[in-house]
Amino acid sequence: WTSCKETETPPVENEEELITTVELTFTNQDDPADVLTFRFSDPDGPGGADPDTFDTIRLATSSVYDLSVFLLNESVSPVEDITTEVEEEGTDHQFFFVVDPASLLSVVYADTDSNGDPIGLLNTVTTNTAAAGTLTVILKHQPDMKDGSSTTGETDIELSFITEVN
């Protein structure tokens, strides 16, 4: 007689998404027709040619904007919408926004995952007085470890946009 032992199939690791394009869309809450989109695009991904687009963010002083973050992989056809993946895997992802100088603007999360923790695809941005600096956008992949810390997990993308408030 022979016995069969079932072998477990190891769980499939969630592969890191290739993000070639990041679009930040700012909609002025006082004037919804005032929509500004700023873009980063590196069609071949990290390590190859330099990015072909890396916009400077220009916002008005003393304004409140709804900020939507869109992520794409444009190295494949059809273009892959990574935004949807991040939203679907919200409990494993979080955006972090580092503003330098801190007085340049503030960013408040406007979306949450199924556990009530922030994701950062939707945000509210408030500008102050005229100034210049940087807005660094960081997407962290934090499966089973999302704790609100930008030092935890793997970095999916990190971009520092030159930012002007006039």
Image: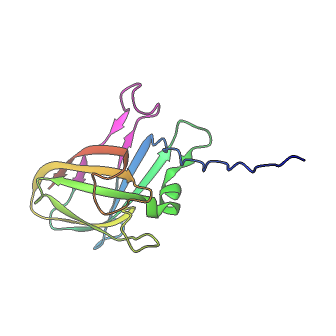
Image quarter in which the C terminus is found: bottom left
Q: Which is nearer the eye, 41 or 31?
A: 41
- Name the dominant secondary structure of the magenta segment: loop
| Residue 137, percent from left and from top | 30, 51
Give me the residue at 41% from left, 35% from top.
42
Give the residues drawn in magenta, as a range: 38-58
Seen from this angle, which residue lies furthest right? Answer: 1
Q: Is residue 91 above or below residue 157?
A: below
Name which quarter of the figure residue 55 lies in.
top left
Residue 47 painted magenta: yes
Lateral position of residue 12 relative to residue 142, left or right: right
Seen from this angle, which residue lies furthest top? Answer: 49
| Residue 41, percent from left and from top | 40, 39
| Residue 23, percent from left and from top | 39, 50
| Residue 84, percent from left and from top | 52, 58
Q: Which is nearer the eye, 43 or 156?
A: 156
Give me the residue at 28% from left, 54% from top.
150
Lateral position of residue 153 relative to residue 3, left or right: left
Give me the residue at 43% from left, 60% from top.
144
Q: Is residue 114 above or below residue 92?
A: below
Residue 137 painted magenta: no
Lateral position of residue 123 relative to residue 86, left or right: left
